[in-house]
Each structure stands twice: as structure tokens, then as C-alpha cells.
Image (spheres, rainbow, N blue to C red):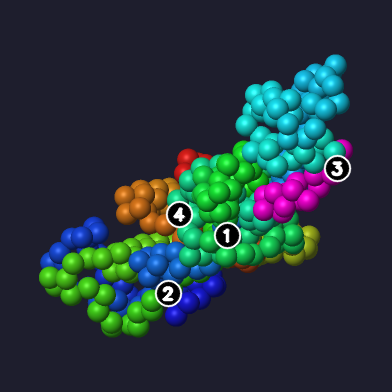
Amino acid sequence: MVNRRASLLLAVALLAPARTVPAQVPAYRLGDVATQEVVTPVPLMIIDPERTAALQQREALKVPVVVRFQADAAADAEAALSHAFANARSNFLDALYRTMKGRPESERQIGGALFQRAVESARRRTDGFPLLDALAPVWARDESDADAQDDLAAKLRAVMERPIIAGKAPAIFNAKNSIRLVPVDVLTDQPTPETVEKSGTIVRGTQLASLAAARSELLHAFAREEQASARFLARFLTTNAWVDADLTQLLRTRRVEALCITESYAPAQVIVTQGQVVDAKTLAALNQLREKSLIGTLQTQLVQAKTATQQSRSRGRWLAGGAATLTLLCLLVLWRVRARRPMVGVPALAPAAAASVTQWQSRALAAEARVEQTQQAIRGGFLEWMRQRVVQGLFRQRAELLSAQEGAEAEMRSLEQRLEQLHAPLQERIAAYERRIAELEKELASKGEENRELIKAKILLAKHQLNAARERGEAGHFGRN
């Protein structure tokens, strides 16, 4: 079917969630004979290149050829004809005056020998004016030659009402199709597409004629005995039109650029059978299937990287929780030890008993001092052990994050190389990168600090590749132009 939004549908089909696709899509080329059958496991929508080209060609021919038309050229040609009449009359009257000057009145009659001598003299000066014999008596009587002049002017105007070009029409013109006449003051004016739509007049293509064809048409409009007048009048024919091939091509491109014919493939449908010759439509389907395969692989790799990051984050939380629990237990032990110090008062004893008590107290204080030293040693060693464990855990977590980031970069570079080798359509790759950037930015809002750094790095990498792809697309575009 004809679908003017096929480009949008194609982009949606490419960015749809990838299902199971073949690990290797055969790299056939146009005209190859397929050595194996290929079945698509996912829905595909492609543009049929051959049918689309045929449709665009048919629709393009419906846009009339633009022809610049200078309508005032006919008036200019009539003015030149009128000037030729005036010049011939002036030359004849001057010759008649010089011939008749000083001659008797009996020799000055119209049609006499002197009159014919004046006509012949004027003929040499009027460059073959064909109506000199017919108009000489009229001019001699000082009468108007308007009837003869108007008759020739009407025939000249009738021919010049149609568009006349200098030579052969360009290849873009086809007499079977219509043309659009766009009025201009001079043929060098360049109308805009908007001007064409507003002021153009559509006529049949047969109206356009070359200058040689227009002169031939004019000669056939006169009788055989009037061919001298016809040849004289043909001198005043001039071009009044110009076929604007560039503007026509621009309008046709605008008309057909959104037209295409799409072809859909359902899951489990055969794309190419063994022994089949790969045509343009089949090749487009295989390329899209290969593109979906690459996008699905990238999504799987990104999911794996995301899972590894989440696992690293979970281990970090457990490590931090364990360190906090051990610290609290250590503090609780120290508090209980301090709480058990003897604080009970001793009553007055005999000197011997007092000495014994004093000796016992000394040994107790010494033991307490040793306990305090032991506690300090334990406390210092435990805290150092805890610090080392935390630092080692942080370094390990950082190393895992860096490893995941490097892996993501390697995967993106690998994908880019495969896309280049497969010559995947540039717009499809750009759309895939844009979609991935949007997903990463959405994920960024709900992640921890370490993951945020990793996702930011992925976003920067994806944007860099997107910009590079766009620059290549613009360079290709200008190169084609």
C-alpha cells in the first residue's frame, strides 16, 4: 500500500523491542543467489525500492513542467513591425520627392515612369519590404496603411500567444503532459515555488513550440502568393518562453519525497528461499533484520552490564552494613568492660589486714592497667582491620565499576564497527542511539552515586557516537548535492 508516513512506521519497527533474531544474517548482495533460507522471527516493515521508484516516477510526471513566459514579447514584436512599416514609408516618400523634384506636373502621376523609378529606389533602401508595390500609391496619396499593418500584426500576435523557446526542449519536457506557464517580466527572472503555485497557468504541452516550428507555422498561415509577406513577418518572431528544468525537478521532488510503498513481514515468514535471486526488496528486508539483530545484541549486553552494576552495588551495601555492625559490637564490648570496674568502699582494717588490702589493690590496679592496655591494643588493631576492609571493599567496587564502564565502551565500539561494515541505514542508527540515550537519562534519576557516574559515561559515549553519525549523514548529503 502507498503510505506517506512510511518513514515513521519504519523507525517504529526498527526501535520495537527486539525478540529472538538469528545470530548471523547472511550477508547477501543484490543479485546473489541465496544459499540458505532465511525466516524472520520478528515483524518487519520495509520500503520496496523498485515499486517505490516506479510510483514516484509516475507521480512526478503529474507535476507540469514549469515554463517562464514573457507575455510582453508579442507587444515588442508588433512594435518592431510597426517601425518597419514607418521606415519603409519614409524611404519611399523620400525617394519619390527626389525623383519628382523639378519634373513637370504631367510626369508626376501615380503609376507613371517616374513613380516606378521612385518605387525601385525605395525598394533598395527598405531591405525587401514586401508590400511596397501595394502601399506605394497609398503613401503617395498620404493615406493610412493601418489596414495592411493590422492584418500582419494580428497574424504575428496569433503565433506569439503561445510559448516559444529558442531551441529544442530539454529532456524533462514531454508534449503529452501539461506545462505551467509562469508570467515573468524578463526570461532571466527566477520564480519561486510559491510564485508557481499562485500565478502559474496550466496549458497543454503541445502549446510549447520552438522558434523554428513557430516560423514554419506562420509560413503555412499565408497563401502561396503571400509567401513574401510571410517571410517578412517571420523576421519579427522571437522567443518568449524558457523551460525551467531545475525548478520543475524541485517541485517534483517535493511532490514524491514522502511517497513510498511498504512491505510487511510477519513473524515466521520466509524472507528468502534457497536458490532465490536476491532483489532490492529482499535485500532491504535482510538489512533490517540484521539491524534488529545488532540492536537486540546491544540491549542484551547493556542489560548484563546493568545487572553487574547492581550486584556490585548490593555487595557494597552489605559490606558497609557489616562494618557498621562490627563497629557497634566493639563499642558495646568496651562499654561493658568499663562498667565492671570495682567502685565499692573498704572499711577500716587492722594494720596487717590493711597491708594485705594495699597489696591486693596494687595487684588489682596492675591487672586493670594490663587489661586497659590489652583493650587499647585490641581496639586499635580492630579499627585498623576495619579500615583496611572498608578501603579494600571500596577499591574493589571502584575497579568493578571501571571494568563495567570499559566493557560498555568496548561493546559500543564493536557495535559501531559492525554497523559500518553492514552499511546499515544512517537514519536507523541515529534513531537507535537517540532511543538509548533517552533510556539512560531516565535510568539516571533513580540510581546510586557509583551507578550515576557509570550511566553518565555511557550517555556521553552514546551522544558522541550520535553526533558522529549525524556528521557523516550531513557530509553524505552535501556530497550528493
- Crowding at dot 2, Cα within 10 Å, few <14 / some 14-19 / many 20+, comes out as many
Looking at the rendered structure, which numbered label has been put on residue 143? 3
The three-letter code of the residue at mark 3 reads: Glu
Q: CA distance from mark 4 to mark 1?
A: 45 Å
Query: In the image, residue 146 lies at what x, y percent?
Result: 81, 47
The three-letter code of the residue at mark 1 reads: Gln
Looking at the rendered structure, which numbered label has been put on residue 262? 2
Q: CA distance from mark 3 to mark 1?
A: 39 Å
Mark nearer the N terminus (3 vs 1): 3
Q: Are marks 3 and 1 in contact (CB under 8 Å)?
A: no
**Residue plotted at (24% across, 58% down):** 29
Instruction: Tell us which disc is closer to us: 3 or 1.
Output: 3
Is residue 221 visible to us here?
A: yes
The stretch of residues the image draws in magenta is 142-156
Magenta stretch holds residue 364: no
Q: Which residue is the site of mark 4?
A: 426
Mark nearer the N terminus (2 vs 3): 3
Looking at the rendered structure, which numbered label has been put on residue 70? none
Left or right position of 197 against 89: left
- Crowding at dot 1, Cα within 10 Å, few <14 / some 14-19 / many 20+, comes out as few
Left or right position of 424 against 444: left
**Residue plotted at (37% across, 65% down):** 49
Query: In the image, residue 381 lies at what x, y percent?
Result: 52, 47
Mark nearer the N terminus (1 vs 2): 1
Instruction: Tell us which disc is closer to us: 4 or 3.
Output: 3
Of helix, strand and loop, which one carries label 2? strand
Left or right position of 332 against 140: left
Q: CA distance from mark 4 to mark 2?
A: 19 Å
**Residue plotted at (48% across, 65% down):** 176
